[in-house]
């Protein structure tokens, strides 16, 4: 016959009195991990928000510049300037002068 102490095996005892403490510990670990996971997600979202806000500011500036450029190109002065410089048009009664380079 073998005795319990001589077998070298250790028997794991489950104490029912420790069950609530173990459950609280497991729940606490879960809550801590969940908190840090959510905190990390919140931090990532805040970084994305800052990036999008910076992008919004840049796009608003570009939009304002484009609106100003649109106003400029729709003005009568700009249209007249383009007609004279690029298209070579003149007003009635004006004479067009074309500069000639020497030697041509």
Image (cartoon, rainbow, N blue to C red):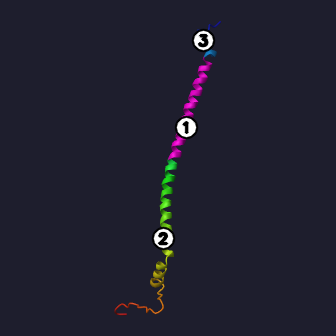
Query: Of all residues shown, which one is farthest toward the right?
Result: 1
Residue at left offset 51%, top offset 53%: 52
Note whether residue 50 is visible. yes
Magenta span includes 72? no
Q: Which mark is residue 69?
A: 2
Task: Compute the Cα span from label 3 to label 2.
Answer: 93 Å
Asked if marks 3 and 2 touch (Cβ < 8 Å), the reply is no
Q: Residues within 10 Å of mark 2 (few under 14, many from 20)?
A: few
Q: Nearer the viewer, residue 103 or 49?
A: 49
The stretch of residues the image draws in magenta is 18-46
Q: Which of marks 1 and 3 precedes in the sequence?
A: 3
Q: Which mark is residue 7?
A: 3
Indicate the position of residue 103 as horizontal and vertical percent values: 34, 93
The numbered mark at residue 37 is 1
Name the mark nearer the viewer: 3 or 1: 1
Residue 29 within the magenta-colored segment of the rendering: yes
Query: Residue 73, how many percent across, how many down?
Result: 49, 75
Is tag 3's residue or tag 2's residue first in the polypeptide sequence?
Answer: 3
Could you tell me which secondary element the residue under label 3 belongs to?
A: loop
Closest to the observer: 74 or 52?
A: 74
- The secondary structure type at the circle numbered 2 is helix
Closer to the camera: disc 1 or disc 2? 2
In the rendered structure, the answer to whether residue 79 lies left or right of residue 19 reads left
Please state the horizontal and vertical placement of residue 63, each as a whole percent of the image.
51, 64
């Amino acid at each position: 016959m073998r005795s319990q102490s001589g077998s070298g095996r250790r028997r794991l005892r489950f104490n029912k009195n420790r069950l609530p403490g173990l459950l609280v510990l497991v729940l606490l670990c879960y809550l801590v991990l969940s908190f840090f996971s959510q905190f990390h997600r919140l931090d990532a979202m805040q970084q994305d928000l800052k990036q999008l806000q910076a992008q919004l500011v840049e796009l608003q500036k570009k939009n304002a510049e484009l609106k100003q450029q649109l106003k400029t190109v729709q003005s009568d002065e700009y249209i007249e300037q383009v007609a004279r410089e690029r298209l070579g048009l003149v007003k009635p009664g004006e004479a067009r002068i074309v500069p000639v380079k020497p030697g041509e």
